[in-house]
Image (cartoon, rainbow, N blue to C red):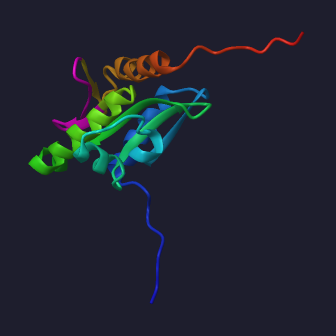
């Protein structure tokens, strides 16, 4: 009997994580495969299906937090796998839980030979991975969500 170590992310996820690292500075941390129940806490009654999903092994692809580990943004890496009816149902449940927790969610998907689509319900940015066209817009979208999610910083003043 033997066991071998395996990579934590596939090549698409690795490319997306590398891109996300170019979007955030040292005031943020990027975490992968974080369980929903690790980042969302039930504080009132939930629909049974949502509650069951919250405590399932379901995880988000990338979670960006501030230095105090407060969630700022979730980025879900979409592929053709997410086009199935079952996957769409799971994605809707995940989006609902994150919305209830007030954690912003955007999706990423590579289409059309190297075009990276970053999108939410109300906006979309297309970034060409080969030419770099619109890189700044894509990075700006990630940074905007992170800035909007960070609570005001308070300084302790010594008397």
State the image coordinates of residue 155 (x, y, percent, origin top left). Answer: 73, 14
**Vertical side of 96 occupied by 139: above or below:** above
Hey, which residue is sitting farthest front in the picture?
Answer: 45
* Residue sitting at x 28%, y 40%: 94
Residue 106 picture quarter:
top left
Q: Is residue 109 magenta?
A: yes
* Residue sitting at x 26%, y 25%: 120
* Residue sitting at x 33%, y 37%: 45
Q: Does the magenta stretch mainly form a helix, a strand or a loop? A: strand
* Residue sitting at x 21%, y 38%: 92
Residue 156 in view here:
yes
Give left or right: position of 41 versus 12.
right
Hey, which residue is sitting farthest left in the picture?
Answer: 85
Q: Which residues are magenta?
A: 107-122
Q: Is residue 67 magenta?
A: no
**Vertical side of 27 occupied by 112: above or below:** below
**Vertical side of 39 occupied by 127: above or below:** above
Residue 35 in view here:
no
Quadrant containing the N terminus in the rendered view: bottom left
State the image coordinates of residue 25 (x, y, percent, origin top left). Answer: 57, 26
**Vertical side of 121 occupied by 42: above or below:** below
State the image coordinates of residue 98 (x, y, percent, origin top left). Answer: 34, 33
- Foreground residue, 73 or 128? 73
């Amino acid at each position: 009997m033997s066991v071998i170590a395996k990579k934590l992310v596939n090549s698409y996820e690795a490319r997306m994580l590398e891109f996300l690292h170019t979007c955030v500075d040292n005031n943020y941390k990027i975490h992968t495969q974080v369980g929903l129940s690790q980042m969302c806490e039930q504080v009132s009654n939930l629909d049974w299906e949502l509650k069951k999903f919250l405590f399932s092994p379901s995880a988000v692809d990338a979670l960006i937090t501030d230095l105090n580990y407060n969630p700022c943004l979730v980025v879900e890496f979409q592929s053709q796998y997410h086009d199935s009816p079952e996957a769409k149902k799971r994605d809707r449940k995940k989006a609902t839980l994150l919305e209830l927790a007030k954690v912003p969610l955007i999706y990423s998907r590579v289409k059309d030979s190297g075009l990276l689509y970053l999108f939410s319900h109300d906006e979309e940015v297309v970034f060409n991975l080969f030419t770099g066209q619109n890189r700044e817009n894509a990075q700006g979208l990630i940074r905007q969500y992170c800035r909007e999610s960070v609570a005001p910083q308070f300084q302790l003043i010594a008397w």
